[in-house]
Amino acid sequence: MSDPPGAAVELRDIRKSFGGTHALRGVTFVARAGEVTALVGENGAGKSTLLRVLSGVTPADAGNIRLDGQVRELRSPKEAQAAGIAIIHQELSVLPYLSVAENVYLSRLPLRGMFLDWRRLTADCRALLDRVGVRIDPHVRVGHLSLARQQLVEIARALALDAHVLAMDEPTASLSDDEVRNLFRVIRQLRDEGRAIIFISHRLDEVFEIADHITVLRDGQVVGTLSRAAATVERVVSMMVGRPIDQQFPKQPTRPGAPLLEVRDVWTRELLRGVSLVVHRGEIVGLAGLVGAGRTELARAIFGADPIERGAIVLDGQHVTIRNPGDAVQFGIGFLTEDRKKSGLILNFALFRNHTLPSLSKFARAGQLIERLEVEAFARWAADLRIRARSPYQPAHDLSGGNQQKVVLGKWLERNPRLLILDEPTRGVDVGAKVEIYEIMNRLAAAGAAILMISSDLPEVLGMSDRIVVMHEGRVTGEFQRAEATRESVIKAAIA
């Protein structure tokens, strides 16, 4: 087999197993110079494992890596960087207590004699940030930046390596629309300079906008590679999940019952300014708005994570005082938070331990936890939610993002909540897992649960909500029934 023309990097017949799990089953993948190659697939398909092999973090069990036609052994991230490969992983690796400039040039800080040359470091960092189109003070600590800006610092650090191959794993997950447009401008600039770009994203609209070729992985194998001209969303989705998906948002019609949650004129110290809304039994209410609108703050106030200064929460017609999340759980409220890794899971805990955390009393006998009952409960929900895991004893950090999200969802379903708050329920989740989560939402609503869904994905809000409430700067600025809601009307209310 001869090397394809213009190939910058080629992974040939890569195989990798973890215990009895075959993560990569003979993957051959090519990223050519001067092109953007998208790598797509469901959570657990092997995308991130393939990047870890390319970055030298994870050794392959078999196969080889070729750079410009030459076989190379990349036994560490340092060797990969020296070979001209830069990887931006899904989990950020910035150092929060160092400045932006120090993070960007950490691997090659400029020295004047034995001392750091701060003037040159600052000047070089400013020039690079200008190139990326980001206005950030090089002296500010990275830990003081928003998650989106930390992501941009990570990208700037990769560019500082002057890499020939740049791989990005979900680089837009925390970026606003404007920041995504700016990132795509940088990607196109790097592509036109002759670099090979590998782009991983669950957002197929972004893939179709930026990619020249699309390679699809499923169950650790390459299903196929399509040129952008030959690809369609339906074809790519079918290749990813092994079956056609006729409807992206499988919303089932419901007949809402009596009000279950009533938020009456709620104020908080930080942001909320007289918020009122109602969620009925059997109803999915979508909560829309721009970043900073107060959606998550409202969810935290309902759940008792943030104190309410004024106003009332009413459940099933009864005024309730929710002083903390423990109270909320006792009142039958579940809360899937927007950041599953920080506040949804204990990553080094076994899966069954994470599953039973909100329901420990249910699995105790005479004050003693019965592990067998915990494991059996997790196994039931793992089968129901189609969680891909080797064992109930596997730590949560081993799972893909979509499977982690299902674990968080499962722990609340174990309690059979009457009100379930979902904050960005499908963020970082592949298209197949998204549909599965939507079907779970339908099932819960049909059983009479009330669902408050916060989402920054407007098509998701429009596609899955019975009613849409829009917030702006801590206030409700619009409310729409499903039949009357449009993209334009929701956006107009969100920027009111």
Image: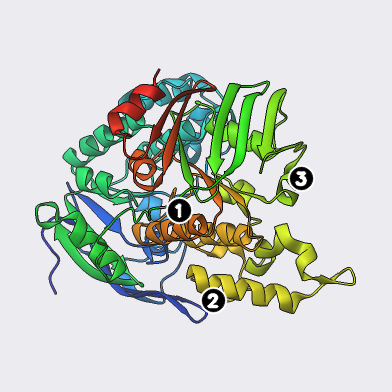
Q: Which residue is mark 3?
A: 327
* Location of the C terminus (image quadrant): top left
Element class at badge 3 = helix
- Which is more N-terminal, label 2 or label 1? 1
Q: Which mark is residue 78?
A: 1
Which residue is rendered at x = 32% and y = 69% of the image?
Answer: 218
Task: State the residue in front, 247 or 87.
Answer: 247
Mark 3 and mark 2 residues within 8 Å of each other at the beta carbon: no
- Which residue is outermost to the right? 366
Amino acid at circle 2? Arg
Marks 1 and 3: which is nearer the front? Answer: 3
Amino acid at circle 1? Lys
Element class at badge 2 = loop
Which residue is rendered at x = 58% and y = 25% of the image?
Answer: 275
Q: Residues within 10 Å of mark 2 (few under 14, many from 20)?
A: few
Above or below 43: residue 484: above
Marks 1 and 2: which is nearer the front? Answer: 2
Amino acid at circle 3? Asp
Which residue is rendered at x = 38% and y = 59% of the image?
Answer: 435
- Which is more N-terminal, label 3 or label 1? 1
Above or below 454: residue 397: below
